[in-house]
Amino acid sequence: MAPQDKQPDKESQKNKKPLKIIIKKRGPGGGGLMNQGILALIIFLLLISIYSALSGLGSKTEEISLSDLSNQINQGLVTSVEVKGNDLSVKYGDNTIKVSKKEENTALTTTLKNYGVTGEQLSKVKISVVSDQGFGYWILSLAPIILPILFVVFFLWFLSRQVKGAGVQAFTFGQSKARMISPDDKSQKVTFKDVAGAKEAKEELAEIVDFLKNPKKFLEIGARIPKGILLMGAPGTGKTLLARAVAGEAGVSFFSISGSEFVEMFVGVGASRVRDLFDMAKRAAPAIIFVDEIDAVGRVRGTGVGGGNDEREQTLNQILVEMDGFEPNEKVIVMAATNRPDVLDPALLRPGRFDRRVTLDLPDRKDREEILLIHARRKPFAEDVNLPLIAERTPGFSGADLYSLMNEAAILAARENRNKVFQFDLIRSIEKVMLGPERRSHILSKTEKRLTAYHEAGHAVVASVLQYADPVHKISIISRGRAAGYVLKLPIEDKKLQSRKEFIDDITVALGGYVVEKNLFGDLTTGPSNDLQVSTALARDMVTKYGMSEKLGPVALEGQGGKPLYGASLDDREYSERVGAEIDAEVSKIMTGAMTKAEELIVEHRKLLDAIATRLIEVETIEQKEFEDILVHHGIPLKKKKDIEHQE
């Protein structure tokens, strides 16, 4: 790990949850009605503006007085006059038109004679009278009155419709929000062929499929299929996908909902939604109900953890009642997923409810290769693509991580205007998924670059010399994600168990950069902060979780992530202050011993450290082949698979 930045620790990456973006629709009440009223008012003002603009279009015609009109008639300039009520439209010899107004209740000819127009001149002017009648006339006359009335009527209708919608939603507030996938929906259908790996899990669920397809043979022999199946595993291992695959294989309806969608601020709403969901499933039977993240509503009751409100507990009680009320011939299976089975209420896990638990582990090398092949569909690959090699270089990746890897590789190829995905795209995607994108704009000064190079070289030297540390595949001082530099260590083969010796070596490797900064540069930076956090947390787990302390012995004092055991509240501890002090002393002892070991190795292999750091300053990145050449040149044996087997 390098100065100024932190590398995400393995434990936090392992337990991270994908970010879910939830877009909440605003209801029809309150601010919604106010916004719609403002919109209606704006429309009304806009209509008034349009009407005013249209009504004012004719105002550009010049208006003349009767005396001017009389003089112009005497001069012979006027050819015709159109009389429409009291309005006059005067047409001249050059086809221009002007307007005027006559006296009320007086004939136009009489008025003109009074203004001195002679009968001879008047006879030369064509005078026509147009009566104010017809549909258009009345529309224009009544428009200023009718339009506001029509708008008020429309506005009242619009508001009543919204209020009616609010009332309907009030009645449907307690209805289930589950999404249903019909067995006839081919576009969303998933089968076991779409789920790679998880062989044991698929075998466990195959009999569920058989029961849904042919329940008669089970019922005739007196067998009752489990009512509830709990899928447990790390995030991204395919719990939801596997549940959908069971429904797809059986050809039944699939109702999916999140545990958090049951819980509302109003007491009783969640229980109502549970009842409605189970009623829907019974009507569509055979069917599968899938509750994702059930720990959101199914936590241990009475501990105060997770809110402890009446609404959540009532919702959980209703789930328990509905599951206990099933009959064998109803053919409704409840499946749920969680990555925190330790916090679930014991009543959920008793026989008759979620009595079958299926664990999904992270995929091994062969499973990863199969998952990569599934995600490789419809992706054009170049001839140099080697998926088995990618599977070897991705230990600890979940199915979701592998999907992200393949997707990032395709994005990289498209970004560089290539129509095929190459092997180096996949290699770069591994590091992008693990650590984040490169930050080439994050330029280090010469001093920082030298410090970072020696820091990462310290990690690499210690990892290469220690017997139980994973081999180094790459070293880089190019910023990626939050790290200013990184050492990529990957195990030679997948491991399900880790020994105390491996933990000690991992802590020693993590302290390699700290020791280099302290001893070679005579100062410390913020760079090793994440190394210290990761190694300290690992040392504490060794003492409190794994019983690897010689002084405290085989005692588990804390649960997952340093939390208390047995659902106790957060401020409760299962040990005294004296034992807490002993835990701190044991953690400090492990850390001090690892640091002393790292100091000895750095001093012993100083030439190797200088060679790696110098090469890093020159090229910024050292790949596995070049790094192994440097090790061989300095007499360090390479770690091979047979060596690991011999150690075990």
Image: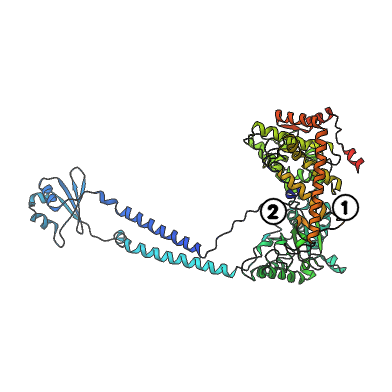
The residue type indicated by label 1 comes to: Glu
Residue 587 placed where, x, y %?
A: 80, 50
Q: Earlier in the sequence, mark 1 or mark 2?
A: 2
Tell me if residue 267 can be seen.
yes
Residue for badge 2:
188
State the mark number for residue 550. 1
Residue lying at 73% horizontally and 50% vertically, measured from the top left: 12
Q: Which of 68 and 131 lies nearest the eye of the viewer?
A: 68
Label 2, secondary structure: give it.
Answer: helix
Q: Is residue 43 shown above or below 471?
A: below
Residue 175 placed where, x, y %?
A: 63, 67
Can you tell which quarter of the image residue 323 is in? bottom right
In the figure, is residue 142 to the left or right of 212? left
Residue 422 placed where, x, y %?
A: 72, 35
How many other residues sit within 10 Å of disc 1, few (<14), some (14-19) or many (≥20)? few
State the mark number for residue 160. none
* Count of marks placed on residues: 2
Question: In 3D space, how far apart are the residues under numbered discs 1 and 2 (Cα atoms)?
Answer: 55 Å
